[in-house]
Amino acid sequence: MSQNVPYASPADTAVHGEYRITRAPGDERPLYRFTGRITADGSSGFAAEPGRYHIYAGWFCPWAQRTTIQRALNGLEDVVSVSYVDGRRDGRGWAFRETYGPDPVNGFTLLRDAYERTEPGFDGHISVPTLWDRRSGRVVSNDFRTIGIDLATQFGRWSNGADTYPEDLRAEIDALDARLGPAVNHGAGAAAGTGDAALAARALLLETFAELDDRLATSRYLLGDRLTEADVRLWVTLVRYDVGPNHARAVNPGLTAYPHLWAYARDLYQRKPFTGTTDFAAFTEPGASVPDWHAPVERPLPA
């Protein structure tokens, strides 16, 4: 390890304990304290500007990958920077280690440092993605649901013109998310458990996969011939489904059991924004069999 580069010490739960997700009383969701928004006109206090924002991401995390895919789809690689935390965590939270390099913006060793810099004594959830504002020196947001949308909609002056959250489809995109979020994005992990709740989650997951398979038999993307935020949200779970830590595949059929859904997932993987933001090694469990994501895609659908 270089003496000149700040890195966190190795993850050690014996010394630092396990990380505990902070939740509000009566709410099972993690407590996301920062929910700032970027706006093109700066009315939110955070104006869209090249070079101003940085995303702290994690290769392992589907929620973080949503933002890195959107960044790439919109051609914002030179506008919004990104770096990656190490995939191991103890009670201190996510950290910067030699695995993926140091924090290039602040030289923090722990992601927690960014939160403490923003709010001393921070007691909420420390997560990726985290959106950092270089100008004010603070966290803007760790709400994965909105960071990607802001990248897709507020940087038009510097974007390549991709429109993955078009106004005429936003209601449909959000309605799909209301269904697919619980059934697939969260349901895949729940279905890998045991007990009545897992059985119910499994039944809903497989029913939803069957519905998606039927939908994608005649549609290239979830909403016709336009690639949208809905596809990004679904795909980050699909790419982890057969190999991820929740072992959903151990108790359920794999993606290959759904030919149109599997072809759709591979179709997206052929695109650089999806391929380039995916590191199977970061989320594949030891011994898991990785499907052939490079298998030819034959979909008689419009380009």
Image: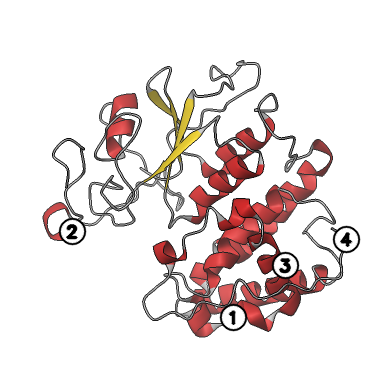
Q: Residues within 10 Å of mark 4 (few under 14, many from 20)?
A: few
Label 1 element class: loop
Marks 4 and 2 sit apart, C-alpha to C-alpha, by: 51 Å
**Foreground: disc 4 or disc 1:** 4
| Residue plotted at (84% across, 58% down) | 303
State which quadrant residue 288 falls in. bottom left
Label 2 element class: helix
Q: In the image shown, does 183 or 241 lie closer to the viewer? A: 241
Residue topped by disc 4? 302
- Asked if residue 148 can be seen in this view, the reply is yes
Q: In the rendered structure, which disc, 4 or 2, sits on the residue that comes first in sequence? A: 2
**Foreground: disc 1 or disc 3:** 3
Q: Residues within 10 Å of mark 2 (few under 14, many from 20)?
A: few
Q: In the image shown, does 240 or 115 lie closer to the viewer? A: 240
Amino acid residing under circle 2: Thr
Q: Residues within 10 Å of mark 3 (few under 14, many from 20)?
A: many
Across and down, in percent, residue 129 comes to 46, 43
Q: Is residue 2 left or right of residue 217?
A: left
Q: Is residue 142 left or right of residue 215?
A: left
Residue topped by disc 1? 254
Residue topped by disc 3? 264
Q: In the image shown, does 130 or 187 lie closer to the viewer? A: 130
Q: Residues within 10 Å of mark 1 (few under 14, many from 20)?
A: some
Across and down, in percent, residue 67 comes to 55, 44
- Badges 4 and 1: C-beta atoms under 8 Å apart? no
Label 3 element class: helix
Marks 4 and 1 sit apart, C-alpha to C-alpha, by: 27 Å
Q: In the rendered structure, which disc, 4 or 1, sits on the residue that comes first in sequence? A: 1
**Foreground: disc 1 or disc 2:** 1
Amino acid residing under circle 3: Tyr
